[in-house]
């Protein structure tokens, strides 16, 4: 972690237009955020990089864009209606609700060495026993009720006539849309096992615990892959390792995240979901500790078999060479885009004490704007015109922002805080020799660069 606390990151995000509390004019909505102009750009960059690296660049991957509202039977088959639950407790005085496992985690952190438990291993009755034995209270210091399983699937209804509405669910994961389309993808494209289907999109969960900014929200975006294979032809452990390597490369290489802030955590046998034979989380060290960024699970053929049983359809792959029929197994790397977003802000945040500035040291390919262009003075038309020409030319190649407010120092300060890697200033020398000043965000070093070479100079350093 960069050393920044969550309040600092939240304040910067709001101040500079990355993230706002949603519908704030009405007092906001718990665990719900809007992404401002810069946040929208940053999210787009993350999505585009994920799609490019994990779908476009791979011959064994295709994309999908399925609905948020699926046939409700989907969620019965997948097990979500029965068991997509969190352990809910209620403060007996304030009636505020909390997750029992989160209260236990907080208690353990405050009482080091006093209890030897792995929170992820506790079931509801273990949690009830722990809360009672240790007198764990709510954050307000009151007694809490015994935990009960609370289903976090979001319910809504299709139809307008009262009494004739039918219950549907906002999807709790994007993965199920991939399984329900499995047969159609096989029939309509040329995929051959092993192959993967990736999808990006919104998911919804009625989360109980709130208050970790965009880390855990009611509505969020997932980037999930179901990688199908024949367990008789492919070794699942090799494929699992291949995907772990790919995830690591994406986070450390493509996104440029510091290795020391990352770790793999293997799920214990008790913690693992019922459908999974192996699960690892790639955790990032957020300001509130190491937490899951990206999960990878070997889901076997659990989901396809469940959909076969519920739909009565044959969801099989027929080997074109041998004619052998197989219900493929899957490995599932499941990423949360909003967690990537928060990780990027935390990892990039840097207080440069020597130069008394705050800098978002985002990798240039991730930064909302790659370059800012300034005329030295905004009341000198010849400077403004020259700067506009440069600005318009760069716009064809990258995201560029224009700034002519205040003095140059203030503009640099602002661009540093939003992570713009290069600032280009058009000054009086430019009019004489067709060069500009290019200032590097991280070093604050300035260089004169010929306008003819400016695009190449920037592209070599940005690598979009
Ligand atoms: N299909 C498997 C699945 O959904 P998950 O671990 O529940 O697995 C995958 O979710 C990823 O989605 C997580 O690693 C996390 O990054 C993100 N995620 C899950 N719940 C979230 C929430 N309430 N807010 C933001 N991101 C969330």
Image (cartoon, rainbow, N blue to C red):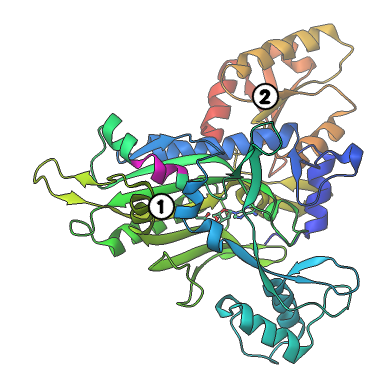
Asked whether residue 355 is in view, the answer is no
Among the 4 quarters of the image, the one containing residue 424: top right
Quarter holding the N terminus is bottom right
N-terminal label among 1 and 2: 1
Q: Is residue 181 covered in magenta?
A: yes
Vertical order, 285 against 310 (above or below): below
Residue at point 39% right, 34% down? 56
Q: Position of residue 451 (x, y in %)?
A: 62, 17
Between 31 and 443, the residue placed more toward the observer is 31
- Cβ of mark 2 under 8 A from ligand 1: no
Q: Position of residue 170 (x, y in %)?
A: 60, 44
Check disc 1 and report its element: helix, strand or loop: helix
Disc 1/disc 2 C-alpha distance (Å): 31 Å
| Residue carrying label 1 | 246
Vertical order, 345 against 41 (above or below): below
Residue at point 33% right, 35% down? 184
Between 450 and 54, the residue placed more toward the observer is 54
Dividing the image into four equal quarters, which quarter contains ligand 1?
A: bottom right
Q: How many marks?
A: 2
For this view, does 227 lie left or right of residue 445?
A: left
| Residue carrying label 2 | 400
Q: Is residue 342 covered in magenta?
A: no
Residue at point 79% right, 48% down? 358
Q: Magenta residues, as a range?
A: 177-182
Check disc 2 and report its element: helix, strand or loop: strand
Q: Position of residue 460 (x, y in %)?
A: 51, 31
Between 234 and 231, the residue placed more toward the observer is 231
Between marks 1 and 2 in the image, the one whose residue lies nearer the viewer:
1
Instruction: Considering the whole magenta stretch, tell me its main secondary structure.
Output: helix
For this view, does 113 lie left or right of residue 145?
A: left
- Cβ of mark 1 under 8 A from ligand 1: no
Vertical order, 400 against 253 (above or below): above
């Amino acid at each position: 972690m960069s050393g920044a606390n969550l309040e600092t990151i939240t304040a910067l995000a709001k101040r500079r237009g990355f993230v706002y509390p949603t519908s704030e004019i009405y007092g906001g909505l718990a665990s719900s955020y809007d992404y401002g102009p810069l946040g929208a750009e940053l999210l787009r960059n993350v999505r585009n990089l994920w799609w490019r690296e994990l779908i476009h660049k791979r011959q064994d991957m295709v994309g999908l864009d399925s609905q948020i509202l699926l046939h409700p039977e989907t969620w019965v088959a997948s097990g979500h209606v029965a068991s997509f639950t969190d352990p809910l407790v209620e403060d007996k005085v304030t009636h505020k609700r909390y997750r029992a496992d989160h209260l236990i985690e907080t208690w353990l952190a405050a009482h080091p060495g006093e209890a030897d438990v792995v929170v992820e291993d506790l079931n509801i009755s273990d949690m009830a026993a722990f809360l009672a034995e240790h007198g764990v209270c709510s954050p307000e210091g009151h007694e809490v009720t015994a935990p009960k399983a609370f289903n976090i699937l979001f319910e809504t209804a299709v139809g307008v006539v009262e009494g004739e509405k039918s219950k549907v669910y906002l999807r709790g994961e994007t993965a199920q849309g991939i399984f329900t389309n499995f047969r159609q993808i096989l029939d309509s494209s040329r995929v051959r096992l092993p192959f993967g289907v990736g999808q990006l999109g919104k998911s919804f969960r009625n989360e109980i615990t709130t208050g970790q900014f965009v880390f855990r929200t009611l509505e969020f975006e997932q980037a999930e892959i179901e990688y199908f294979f024949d367990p008789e032809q492919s070794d699942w452990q090799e494929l699992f390792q291949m995907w772990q390597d790919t995830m690591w490369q994406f986070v450390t290489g493509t996104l440029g995240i510091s290795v020391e802030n990352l770790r793999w955590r293997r799920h214990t046998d008790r913690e693992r979901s019922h459908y999974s034979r192996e699960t690892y989380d790639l955790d990032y060290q957020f300001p509130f500790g190491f937490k899951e960024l990206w999960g990878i699970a070997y889901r076997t053929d659990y989901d396809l078999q469940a959909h076969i049983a519920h739909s009565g359809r044959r969801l099989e792959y027929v080997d074109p060479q041998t004619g052998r029929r197989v219900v493929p197994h899957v490995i599932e790397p499941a990423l949360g885009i909003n967690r990537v977003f928060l990780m990027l802000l935390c990892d990039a945040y840097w207080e440069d004490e020597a130069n008394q500035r705050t800098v978002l040291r985002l990798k240039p390919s991730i930064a909302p704007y790659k370059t800012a262009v300034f005329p030295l003075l905004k009341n000198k038309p010849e400077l403004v015109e020259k700067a506009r020409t440069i600005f318009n030319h760069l716009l064809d190649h990258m995201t560029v922002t224009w700034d002519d407010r205040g003095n140059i120092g203030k503009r640099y300060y602002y661009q540093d805080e939003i992570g713009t890697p290069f600032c280009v200033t058009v000054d009086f020398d430019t009019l004489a020799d067709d060069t500009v000043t290019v200032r590097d965000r991280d070093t604050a070093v300035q260089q004169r660069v010929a306008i003819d070479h400016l695009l190449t100079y920037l592209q070599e350093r940005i690598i979009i």
